[in-house]
Amino acid sequence: MKVGEARAVAARWVAAHRVAGFAGAYVSGSAAWSPAGAELAATSDVDIVILVTGEVPDKIGKLRHQGVLLDVAYAPLEPAENVLASPALAAGLSRGVILADPHGSLAALHATVAGRFAHPRWVRARCAALEDRIAALDRLDTTRPLAERVLSWVFPASLPAVVVLTAAGANPTVRRRYAAAREVLIGCGEAGFHEELLGLLGCADLSAARVTTHLDRLADVYDHVSRDPAGPYAGDLTPQARRISIDGTRDLVEHGLHREAVWWIVVTLARCLTSAPHRAGVLGELLDDLGAGTPAAMRHRARAAVAALPRLRLMREALMRRPCPGPAP
């Protein structure tokens, strides 16, 4: 299916699903950054952001509609300055793939965001928001249950890759963030910095065979997890979402990007263990390989990411001064 066709499916879903305070909807993620005539990858979904006034509903997550896997989230309708400073909102809205705009507010918001998106003031603001989350790792609570502790570490620990993408004006993708950052950094002649990013996560020296073993174990846990429709990650653990969480990750491994796949293996396994804590040993072995297998070791990994912030900020400024070839959407 072409990206444009998938966007049309998303628009039809939005048209049939209105909530109180509905202000409009747009496409975010790779489906917004890709040309309409490009093929939608089998391991991709279409991210929909629905803007509302008033109370913001809980995220819906992944669902299948007319053959397309959608990932639906809500966000408050914000002034342009707030959107421009938001790593989560600015990139998608800057692309202008609007699905619904009943009051014309999204078109005006898009025009402002697109016009200022690349201005250094706003690039730095988005990077600073990410860097603040990295800095918060210095206060990582290692007394939390294992799955919660891992998720509170691994998401902020991966944000240096997103800072790279944000500084370079690229799509701040989620699952493929390390692979996308690699493309940017290699294109800028900074392959060594990519190795530093992998080193901070603890996966720089992991072999393809070892990563494949961890992925196979994850697939087994994923396929047997008890799925709670009301659980915090219900939409990410469905059979429909498997082609992204498992198949999409395996695709990275098979293309030689096994180290870049590790962080999403950690994320998905930790999410599974919120419903299957009896499989904690599988996650424990992976954490051991990353040098984060004990609370003290994870705290050390977290503090290493904080200590690397000055170096990250120097790279951010270098990328902003020297536009680099971006990754494929």
Image (cartoon, helix red, strand yellow):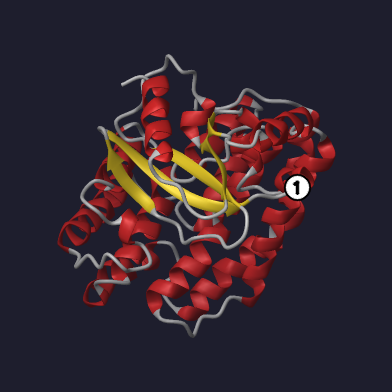
The answer to whether residue 167 is above or below residue 280 is: above
Between 308 and 247, the one nearer to me in the picture: 247
263 relative to 50 in the view: left or right: left
What amino acid type is highlighted by mark number 1?
Pro
From the viewer's perspective, tell me whether residue 246 is left or right of residue 148. Answer: left
Q: Residue at x 51, y 69 (%)?
A: 152
Q: Which residue is mark 1?
A: 79
User: Regarding mark 1 in the picture, which secondary structure is present there?
Assistant: loop
Image location (x, y in percent) of residue 165 = 62, 38
Q: Quadrant of the N terminus?
A: top left
Residue plotted at (55% across, 60% down) = 56
Answer few, some or many: residues within 10 Å of disc 1's Cα (few below 14, many 20 plus, some between 14 and 19): few
The x, y position of residue 151, in whole percent, is: 46, 66
Q: Specify the farthest residue to the right.
A: 121
Along the line of sight, the residue nearer the viewer: 215 or 195: 215
Q: Is residue 313 left or right of residue 207?
A: right
Q: Nearer the viewer, residue 247 or 10?
A: 10
Residue 17, image x, y percentages: 40, 45
Residue lying at 57% horizontally and 53% vertically, measured from the top left:
21
Q: Is residue 126 left or right of residue 21?
A: right
Can you give x and y, in whole percent of width and height, for residue 312 in the image? 71, 49
Is residue 127 or residue 214 the one in the foreground? 127
Residue 202 shows in the view = yes
**How many tags in the picture?**
1
> Is residue 316 positioned above or below 218 on the image?
above
Q: Residue furthest top?
A: 37
Q: Is residue 204 visible?
A: no
